[in-house]
Image (spheres, rainbow, N blue to C red):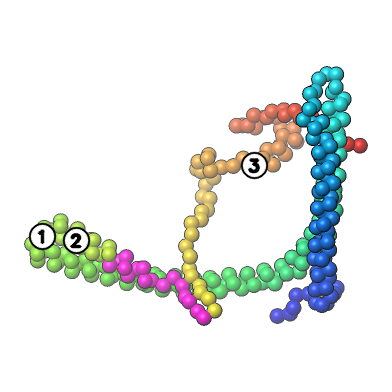
Amino acid sequence: MKMVTDRKIGPVALANRTKDILCKVATESFIVQNAIEEVNKQVDALRDEEKSLVVTSANKSQASELGVKLKKLQKNVDDKRKELKDEPLRECQRIDGMFQPVILTIKTMTDSVAVKLGLVIKEERRKAQEEAEKLAEQARKRAIEEAKKDGLSKHQANNIGSEVASVVYSNVSQSSPTGFVTAGGSSKLNTKKDFEVLNILDIPINFLMVDRDKVMAAINSGVTKIPGINIVDVEKIQFRSR
């Protein structure tokens, strides 16, 4: 298998470039901390004003100005956050993209082996269960015959036979193969619950979820009535900084 490399640079250059990026991230962590400390100072300067603010008709402009300051501060912080994480994030995404093809290839190969191995284990388990049922039935008949010889009634003998059969089936079926252990590891056929939708109209309502994005898209497109939904106006002050 060919080594995964960047098409434009060789593996050594790629390693050095990645190292440089990581070093830069470590360096920028100090820059990030300093930026956060500076923001906290600005927040502290506005916190007392926000806590003591009592809005009246006379000072609405003061409240609006404070809201605008906070909005502007929020935008500056968000811009700085994006600036500091942008280059490392792009590099991580680029590396992920380079490895993605080989990761998908390995997953496909693993799934193929799992399917083939699973078919064999399932067949062996089916045969083992058939053998368990056969042995359980034989044990049931023997137990009934012995119980009748001991003078027990037919009903009592049948009950004893059923109990013996259950024990035999349980002991034998538990030994049915579910996987393998090798020098390098192990493989096991696991069973877990899943589901498939047969008819969505038959599903109880408590298992259904409203798609908020679709509802809002419909409302924003002009829809005014949706069965089972009350469309309301939500009022909220919005600040814009210049």
- Name the mark on residue 60: none
Could you tell me how far apart the alpha carbons at marks 2 and 3 are, in whole angstroms? 57 Å
Compared to residue 22, the image places residue 80 above or below, namely: above
Q: Is residue 197 left or right of residue 93?
A: left
Pick whichever of labels 3 and 1 is earlier in the sequence: 1
Could you tell me how far apart the alpha carbons at marks 3 and 1 are, in whole angstroms? 65 Å
Kindly indicate whether the residue at mark 1 contacts the one at mark 3 (C-beta within 8 angstroms): no
Name the residue type under label 1: Leu
Pick whichever of labels 2 and 3 is earlier in the sequence: 2
Please name whichever residue, 115 or 150, is drawn nearer the observer in this view of the structure: 150
For disc 2, the neighbor class at 10 Å (few under 14, some 14 to 19, many from 20) is some
Residue hosting label 3: 211
Pick whichever of labels 1 and 2 is earlier in the sequence: 1
Residue shown at the point (46%, 72%) measured from the top left: 179
For disc 3, the neighbor class at 10 Å (few under 14, some 14 to 19, many from 20) is few
Residue hosting label 2: 160
Q: Quadrant of the C terminus?
A: top right
